[in-house]
Amino acid sequence: MATADPPARTIRLHPAQRDFLKSDALFRAFCGGIGSGKSWAGSYDLIRRAKPGRLYLVCAPTYGQLADSTFRSFVSLAEQLGIAAPGDIKRSPPPSIRLKTGAEVLFRSGDEPDRLRGPNLSGVWLDEASLMPLDVFTVAIGRLREEGEQGWLSATFTPKGRQHWTFETFATGRPNTALYRARTTDNPFLPPGFHDTVRGQYTSTLAAQELEGEFLDAGGLLFRRSWFPLVDAAPAGLNCVRAWDLAATAPKEGKDPDFTAGVLLGRRGNAGDFFVLDVQRTRDTPQGVERLVQHTAARDGRGTAVAMEQEPGSAGVALVDRYARLLAGYPFKGERSTGDKMTRALPLAASVEAGLVKLVRGRWVEAFLDELEIFPLGDHDDQVDATSLAFARLVAKRRFNFFC
């Protein structure tokens, strides 16, 4: 494939990036851990392969990711290389860039794959491809036919398991495909200590995926059954929190709705082990859920703190206010959530892998372990969310004066 490098600049590459950029495969992927230089490689790969007067497409999973990450990375590199002038960069939606070679690059999100149909293209770059549906890939490769020539497609991503379409497409030896892998530590240009800092927050399995760039079987990324010791009873005098994750809507016939889950978690002092003492889980009407929360609080006793996630907006404030009234006399508090569900579960997962979270035998244990083991790929995450919230309350700097 004939290509022309951008104007001369000092380009620093690590070996995995160099191998990816040299590839002549029609469909090639750079798969690596976070911080391994995937987006930089994808940007430079397109810039150096872009032919004068041809049209190219860059796609990210959502418009937010496109605007906040992919587009910024591409523009920054194009400006550093002197291949794009400010007047040739259209930042308003939908963004695009006309390179000094005369090539035009369109930027789109992949949340509605059918909207990618239309133009004939000479090349496509899918950034964070593992967060996109397969339809994005299948639609994109059908557009690679500009001026009678077969176009190419590159994909950059962190792996999401052997059941994901990116593994089947790029890692199983299909014709015209190539896969290049990199670890986070392969990138010598990261800040000192970056890898070790992130590794300290991950379980070993999640680290293998997110830092080592390994394709793993689904499930067990954060939690494994074998990491939870089972005990017949918990010690007395635990500092306890019952955390609730409420289903968004009432159940409907023929659907698989979310559960409402309330997890009772206790800890010995401020540095002891954790014990999951009980899980209440139901699908019910809002009135039925209110009765369950009230009855459970009465059974737990006034010495048990009660926490509930507060959704954003006025509706979330109103719901927490209603439960504060229903639980008057109990130590109740609404908690605003920060970060995505997996991020919130990471501190809990690290303690689970270390054997610090024990389960008290009960009828709820199997369903609890089933959900946690497949998280975040399962249909439900209510027990994970509730346990993460209870864990966060117990490890917070403020001390409790409540015991169960």
Image: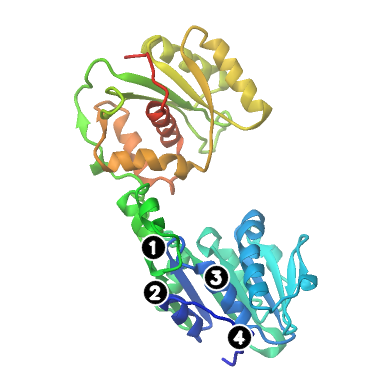
- Residue type at mark 1? Arg
Q: Earlier in the sequence, mark 4 or mark 3?
A: 4
Number of numbered discs overlaid on the protein picture: 4
Q: Nearer the viewer, mark 2 or mark 4?
A: 4
Asked if labels 4 and 2 touch by Cβ distance under 8 angstroms, the answer is: no
- Residue for point 64% across, 56% down: 68
**Tag 3 secondary structure:** helix
Spatial CA distance of label 1 from label 4 is 40 Å
Q: For mark 4, what is the residue?
A: 8
Q: Nearer the viewer, mark 2 or mark 3?
A: 3
Mark sitting earlier along the chain (2/1): 1
Q: CA distance from mark 1 to mark 3?
A: 25 Å
Mark 1 — residue? Answer: 162
In the picture shown, does residue 337 fall above or below 196?
above
Q: The disc labelled 4 sits on which kind of residue?
A: Ala
The residue closer to the viewer here, 327 or 170, is 327
* Crowd tier of the residue under label 1, counting other residues whose Cα lies within 10 Å: few below 14, some 14–19, many 20 or above: some
Residue 40: which numbered mark, if any? 3
Q: Nearer the viewer, mark 1 or mark 3?
A: 3
Residue where numbered disc 2 is placed: 172
